[in-house]
Amino acid sequence: MTGRDRPDTPGAPDASDAHPLHPAYFTTRFHTEAAVPAWPAEFVILSACATTGETWSAERTAQADRALESELRERSTWVVRITGSSPSGDHAEPSWAAILPLPDALDVGRRFLQDALYIVRGDALSVTRCSDDAPLVHVGSFAAHLDQPRADH
């Protein structure tokens, strides 16, 4: 197993990481607009929003989001709108869940100026920086971070 394949302890900074992941990555809640009856065995969650610490215009953010959606729909057989938000809901980032190999997702993340992305394998939610050598850092259970509408609504 490589460092990328082995999730570490939840939220534990990697000793080789000079810039630890922002703590918000470990408390993010995920919401979908509609119920997702079956999640794939493995997928990534990517955003095209401003990198942490930056401010973009609404127009720039919307343009980047449309471009990311278009690229994911060309490259993936499954794409779902998902929003990541703070537990209080005062900050939210429209994102996309997609089936995409991790190296490809990292490349997309870098091109869309993202600091990090999430990967879900089974029910294991991990986060990683968008660099080739960054480790996966275990966040917890994806289901425990997901607030999904009920299928009967």
Image (cartoon, helix red, strand yellow):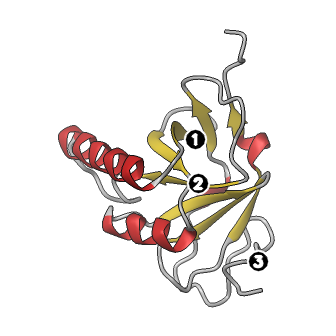
Query: Which residue is identified by label 3?
Result: 6
Looking at the image, tell me whether mark 2 or mark 1 is earlier in sequence order. 2
Q: Residue at x 52, y 79 (%)?
A: 19
Question: In the figure, residue 57 lies in which quadrant?
Answer: top left
Question: In the figure, residue 30 lies in which quadrant?
Answer: top right
Query: Which residue is identified by label 1?
Result: 86
Real-space Cα distance between discs 2 and 1? Answer: 7 Å
Numbered label attached to residue 24: 2
Real-space Cα distance between discs 2 and 3? Answer: 21 Å
Question: What number of labels is visible?
Answer: 3
Residue that sits furthest to the top in the current view: 153
Q: Nearer the viewer, residue 140 or 88?
A: 140
Real-space Cα distance between discs 1 and 3? Answer: 26 Å
> From the viewer's perspective, is 37 left or right of 23?
right
Q: Residue at x 71, y 17 (%)?
A: 151
Q: Secondary structure at mark 1?
A: loop
User: Which amino acid does the dot numbered 2 rest on?
Assistant: Ala
Q: Is residue 122 above or below residue 101?
A: above
Q: Give the label, 1 or 3, closer to the camera.
A: 3
User: Which amino acid does the dot numbered 3 rest on?
Assistant: Arg
* Label 1 crowd bin: few (<14), some (14–19), many (20+), radius 10 Å: some
Q: Secondary structure at mark 2?
A: helix
